[in-house]
Image: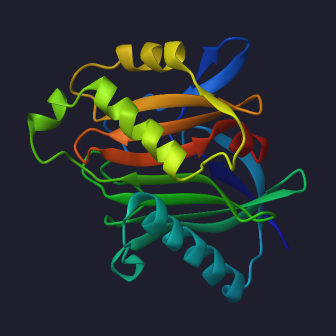
Amino acid sequence: MKTKGIIALGLIGAISIGGGVAYAQVSKNTVPKNVVMTETSVAQVSNKEAESYKKIALDAFEKYFNEDVNSKGLYERLNKLYEQGGQKSYIISWCDQKGETINGNTAIQYTAVIDTKTNKILQLEYHPGVPKNKDYQEFSYDTAKDLADKFVKENNLFNGVNYEFLDKQSKEVNSSNDKASWDYYFYYKYNGKTCLVTVNKDLKKVSQFLFVDEISSLG
């Protein structure tokens, strides 16, 4: 049995890149939630399957972000299998705040979107909450870009496929943010598709990657 639902793919807004579309987080200080949404079907999933996807997500946070997520000490905000046009994705999200409405500025949140056919992570995001102080504002674009490039290379993010850094588009997006923005956004092109990599200024590390076109095809 399936019920109608809404799939949340993160706080992302569309911007033009050449003749195509890429995405950038348009709010600098908020937890990604319920902005880009597509009507879809919520499919049933067994407890065994749910636990399997949770493990994939938790392992990914440790592998990519070196974050050992204590999910038992957090609230599950999303834990669902969605189906759209024959494609299925599993979304799991944990947060340190409870309730339908959370404070996007202070909440700590972990979100993963998984393609159930391949078990590929389509989106992985760690939102660490408020910066400790204002020192993060001095963290430079160039240093953040080096971290993003290193992350992509060391994690073989595109599985050996040739890719290129979208310099103009990345600078365009980041130039629209003021110094107080918590993150830098970097775009990469692979196989004619776009990937967004986010570097958190306070943590001084990558805090999100999002396969824009692949996740869009699921919604």
Q: Name the image colouring.
A: rainbow
Above or below: residue 163 compared with residue 132 = above
Residue 198 visible in the shown view: no
Query: Which residue is found at the position 74% from the left and 12% from the top?
Result: 19
| Horizontal relation, residue 86 to residue 131: left or right | right
Residue 130, percent from left and from top: 21, 47
Above or below: residue 27 compared with residue 119 = above
Q: Quadrant of residue 178?
A: top left
Above or below: residue 153 compared with residue 195 = below
Q: Quadrant of residue 28?
A: top left
Residue 108, percent from left and from top: 31, 58
- Quarter of the picture containing the C terminus is top right
Total labels: the figure holds: 0
Residue 78 visible in the shown view: yes
Above or below: residue 80 compared with residue 191 = below
Residue 205, percent from left and from top: 33, 47
Name the residue at the right extreme. 86
Residue 113, percent from left and from top: 62, 57
Nearest the eye: 142 or 77:
142
| Horizontal relation, residue 214 to residue 139: left or right | right
Nearest the eye: 7 or 201:
201
- Quarter of the picture containing the N terminus is bottom right
Nearest the eye: 177 or 168:
168
Query: Which residue is found at the position 52% from the left and 54% from the top?
Result: 124
| Horizontal relation, residue 164 to residue 198: left or right | right
Q: Quadrant of residue 107?
A: bottom left
